[in-house]
């Protein structure tokens, strides 16, 4: 609709000192004028573009709020108001009541982005939890992925099949990391009761959060905490102990733990380093062949570990959640397992499911020699 006026909250959801609202469309200025009273007597439409104007906003309930308004074009006005959710929501409602259509952030981004990758990167950036993740996404926003995808097509067309294939393989590889940039990697700590799972999670988090008690089976429910290791966002779950439980609530806890382990990016199986491995523990090791194995409470066994550890054929990491031994190594091992390949600065990283699936399809289309279909798939991303 060409003469439609829209209103969009541009600042991401969450707390902030300021909120920014964009009003766009032919009626933008006249709509704002109905609700905004400048401190000076100069009419808004006569003030030069990009000049900020201080004044009062009239909310629907009659309240007034001090805001800053900026006319950026004849059909675009930005309002900067208090950053609290309620304040921004009230501004949006007052504009919607006067006929503006509310647009969500993603619609606004898609309408203003130069290409689909830039739009997706901008959206993903608003969900980035760490600077490290934001830096990778910013590279994609600035065109790293787009340039590489164009390069893939050009190299193939020139007959440089091998280097085109290599670029795609690297993209495929980094896509696993890319898809985790907007939601943390999930690490689940599991193992028998009382071996120090909660204590290890606490040691990693650096604060007392999980329940630590001497009675086996105390941690009945999943305790989930988010943190960042080496700048990568992770979610740590500390599960109920894996053991034969009679109490129905504990049984439920054990079942949930197994379920959670199945969905994790990485399972950490924790055992007590002072104890020999029992057959039930061996079963767990067999059941979770990819798990990182940790033998905790090594402060209590300064001598060599029990021979059963060697026999199990899985090199454990020895830790002491109590005194901190091996915690740094454990954190490094977690990251090495989760992120075997780190992108360098400015490198292309696909970061949405759609991008990764399309890259996979392009790879197999090139492999089968169908360059036309591959080019069509590539252009869908661009
Ligand atoms: P979980 O049931 O596996 O989560 O075990 P907890 O973390 O609740 O710990 C059970 C008990 O072992 C608590 O008394 C902890 O203080 C103790 N504990 C945990 N880790 C260590 C450790 O590395 N060394 C020693 N000596 N005790 C530990």
Image: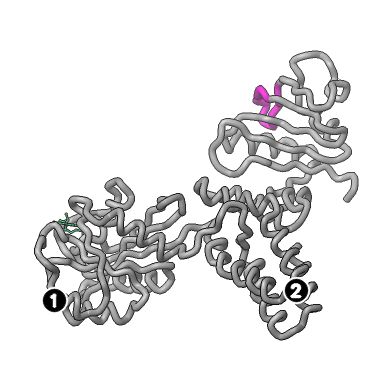
- Image color mode: one colour
- Asked whether residue 130 appears in the rendered view, the answer is yes
Q: Where is residue 124 in the image (x, y as percent from the top left)?
A: 61, 53
Q: Is mark 1 on a helix, strand or loop?
A: helix
Name the front one of labels 2 and 1. Answer: 2
Residue depicted at x 64% and y 40%: 11
Q: Quadrant of ligand 1?
A: bottom left
Above or below residue 297? Residue 141 is above
Q: Please give the residue where the numbered disc 2 appears in the rendered image.
A: 156
Q: Does the magenta stretch include residue 27?
A: no
Above or below residue 150? Residue 210 is above
Q: Please say if the residues under marks 2 and 1 sit with CB atoms less than 8 Å apart.
A: no
Report crowding for label 2: few under 14, some 14 to 19, many 20 or more residues within 10 A (C-alpha). some
Q: What stretch is highlighted in magenta?
A: 56-67
Upstream in sequence: badge 2 or badge 1: 2
Residue 307 disc label = 1
Residue depicted at x 30% and y 49%: 209
Q: Is mark 2 on a helix, strand or loop?
A: helix
Determine the CA span between mark 2 and mark 1.
Answer: 55 Å
Q: Where is residue 120 in the image (x, y as percent from the top left)?
A: 67, 56
User: Quadrant of residue 22 in the image?
Assistant: top right
Q: Nearer the viewer, residue 21 or 332?
A: 332
User: Quadrant of residue 309 in the image?
Assistant: bottom left
Above or below residue 21? Residue 160 is below
The residue at the far bottom in this view is: 368
Q: Nearer the viewer, residue 305 or 123?
A: 305
Q: Nearer the viewer, residue 196 or 326?
A: 326
Q: In which quarter of the image is the C terminus?
A: bottom right
């Amino acid at each position: 609709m060409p003469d439609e006026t829209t209103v969009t909250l541009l600042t991401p959801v969450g707390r902030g000192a300021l909120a920014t609202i964009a009003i766009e469309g032919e009626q933008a200025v006249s709509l704002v004028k109905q609700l905004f009273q400048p401190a000076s007597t100069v009419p808004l439409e006569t003030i030069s573009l990009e000049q900020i104007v201080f004044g009062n906003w009239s909310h629907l309930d009659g309240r007034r709020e001090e805001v800053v308004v900026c006319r950026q074009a004849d059909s675009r006005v930005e309002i900067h108001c208090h950053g609290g959710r309620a304040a921004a929501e009230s501004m949006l409602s007052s504009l919607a009541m006067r006929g503006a259509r509310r647009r969500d952030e993603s619609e606004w981004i898609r309408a203003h982005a130069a290409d689909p990758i830039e739009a997706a990167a901008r959206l993903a950036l608003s969900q980035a939890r760490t600077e490290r993740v934001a830096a990778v996404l910013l590279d994609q926003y600035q065109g790293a992925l787009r340039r590489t995808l164009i390069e893939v097509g050009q190299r193939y067309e020139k007959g440089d099949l091998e280097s085109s294939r290599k670029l795609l393989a690297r993209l495929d590889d980094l896509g696993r990391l890319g898809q985790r940039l907007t939601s943390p990697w999930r690490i689940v700590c599991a193992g028998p009761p009382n071996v120090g799972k909660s204590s290890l999670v606490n040691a990693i988090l650096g604060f007392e959060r999980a329940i630590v008690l001497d009675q086996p089976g105390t941690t009945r429910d999943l305790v989930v905490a988010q943190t960042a290791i080496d700048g990568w966002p992770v979610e740590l779950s500390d599960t109920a102990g894996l053991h034969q439980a009679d109490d129905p609530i504990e049984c439920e806890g054990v079942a949930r733990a197994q379920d959670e382990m199945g969905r994790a990016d990485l399972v950490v199986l924790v055992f007590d380093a002072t104890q020999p491995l029992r057959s039930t523990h061996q079963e767990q090791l067999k059941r979770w062949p990819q798990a990182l194995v940790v033998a905790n409470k090594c402060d209590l066994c300064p001598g060599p570990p029990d021979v059963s550890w060697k026999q199990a054929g899985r090199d454990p990491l020895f830790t002491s959640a109590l005194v901190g031994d091996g915690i740094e190594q454990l954190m490094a091992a977690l990251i090495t397992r989760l992120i075997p390949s780190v992108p360098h600065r400015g490198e292309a990283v696909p970061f949405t499911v759609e991008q990764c699936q399309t890259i996979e399809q392009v790879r197999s289309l090139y492999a089968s020699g169908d360059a036309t279909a591959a080019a069509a798939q590539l252009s869908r991303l661009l």
